[in-house]
Image (tube, grey):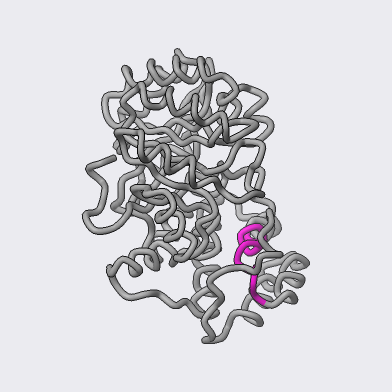
């Protein structure tokens, strides 16, 4: 990962959000500037697993010109080692292990964030993977399962294995997405790890990103839900470090983003089903409408077809006023993607 670090600013990554950061979403993000590095949705790994062909397209058909890391999730060591060899046949920038997904179904299988309950197993997995991965090997983690006080022991495990980067979502599994992050834990990792440490969690504006960096000294930021709401955020952060002009998107710009999402995601459907497309787009819109007019949020939830969907979007977004940078505090809530985000 060190060879990807920009000289004069932190590195920016798009978070691997399950059922979100697929090939169409990558194409849309790149239209608006995009991150420096992408990470795929996770490949589920178990005894008889094969590579998910749809996720693999994010690697083999990568249209962005930016590096793409392949993320795995699982706890079966032989299966993980087998999957590494399969993935490294393709143009991956590296292999990433998911130790952070808080979805209950994942944790019940002792995968993702569920593995953090067993540091000894994490130790064995990291040792086996570090030996097997020929290229870059990175880890995305949370601070612990029940308490951020668990992070001290986990950090000792991470330090042992010569990983190439550690991305830390600054909450525990139990905290999911509802609490403030714990920047002190991320800072501790920055001070002790030999590899770059990337800070993740609650980066929704330039200001929140800059604050997280100042509090932690991290080498970069990984952005998830903030990028769904505001795809210009990567370029806005770059501009805050003197790289390019600061984007100031208007309602009409946001409407263009909505249309791009519709276009790219609908192209992927072999059989187009209008109701399913509208439902998916409403989940995206749930993030974008926060901080805008409450009536927009109310109406968009009740549309059922393409004409109604774009009618509401055009009514509320077809203007040249700058959109708010950040949703109001009371509207920072889950909106349907919550249980899927990793």
Residue 182 lies in the magenta-colored region: no
Residue sitting at x 55%, y 63%: 229
User: Residue 299: image x %, image y %?
Assistant: 75, 72
Q: Quadrant of the C terminus?
A: top right
Q: Quadrant of the N terminus?
A: top left
Instruction: Tell me if 146 is positioned left or right of 122 in this view.
Output: right
User: Residue 294: image x %, image y %?
Assistant: 73, 74
The quadrant in which residue 78 appears is: top left
Residue sitting at x 22%, y 43%: 3
Which residue is at the front of the view, 266 or 154? 154
Q: How many marks?
A: 0
| Direction bottom: furthest residue | 320
Can residue 151 be seen in the rendering of this structure?
yes
Which residues fall within the magenta stretch?
281-292
Q: Main secondary structure of the magenta part?
A: helix
Can residue 90 be seen in the rendering of this structure?
no
User: Residue 267: image x %, image y %?
Assistant: 51, 56
The answer to whether residue 23 is above or below residue 108 is below
The answer to whether residue 130 is above or below residue 72 is above
Instruction: Tell me if 340 is positioned left or right of 226 in this view.
Output: right
Which residue is at the front of the view, 100 or 301? 100
Which residue is at the front of the view, 101 or 253? 101
Residue sitting at x 53%, y 73%: 254
The quadrant in which residue 307 appears is: bottom right
The answer to whether residue 70 is above or below residue 233 is above
User: Residue 50: image x %, image y %?
Assistant: 48, 24
């Amino acid at each position: 990962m060190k060879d990807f670090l920009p000289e004069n600013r932190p590195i920016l990554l798009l978070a691997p959000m399950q059922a979100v950061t697929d090939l169409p979403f990558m194409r849309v993000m790149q239209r608006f500037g995009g991150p420096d590095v992408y990470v795929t949705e996770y490949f589920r790994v178990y005894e008889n697993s094969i590579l998910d062909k749809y996720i693999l397209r994010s690697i083999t058909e990568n249209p962005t010109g930016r590096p793409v890391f392949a993320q795995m999730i699982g706890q079966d060591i032989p299966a993980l080692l087998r999957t590494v060899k399969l993935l490294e046949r393709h143009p991956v920038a590296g292999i990433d292990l998911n130790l952070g997904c808080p979805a209950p179904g994942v944790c019940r299988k002792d995968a993702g964030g569920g593995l953090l309950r067993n540091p000894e197993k994490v130790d064995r997995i990291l040792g086996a993977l570090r030996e097997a991965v020929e290229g870059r090997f990175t880890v995305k983690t949370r601070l612990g399962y029940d308490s951020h006080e668990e992070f001290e022991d986990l950090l000792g495990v991470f330090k042992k294995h010569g990983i190439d980067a550690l991305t830390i979502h600054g909450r525990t599994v139990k905290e999911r997405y509802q609490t403030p992050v714990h920047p002190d834990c991320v800072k501790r990792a920055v001070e002790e790890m030999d590899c770059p440490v990337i800070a993740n969690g609650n980066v929704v504006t330039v200001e929140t990103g800059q604050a997280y960096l100042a509090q932690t000294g991290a080498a970069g930021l990984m952005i998830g839900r903030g990028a769904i709401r505001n795809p210009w955020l990567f370029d806005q952060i770059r501009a805050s470090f003197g790289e390019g002009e600061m984007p100031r998107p208007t309602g009409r710009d946001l409407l263009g983003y909505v249309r791009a999402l519709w276009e790219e995601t609908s192209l992927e459907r072999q059989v187009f089903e209008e109701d399913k497309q509208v439902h998916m787009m409403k989940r995206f819109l749930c993030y974008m409408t926060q901080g805008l007019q409450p009536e927009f949020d109310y109406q968009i939830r009740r549309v059922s077809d393409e004409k109604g969907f774009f009618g509401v979007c055009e009514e509320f977004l077809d203007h040249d006023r700058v959109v708010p940078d950040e949703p109001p505090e009371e509207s920072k809530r889950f909106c349907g993607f919550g249980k899927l985000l990793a």
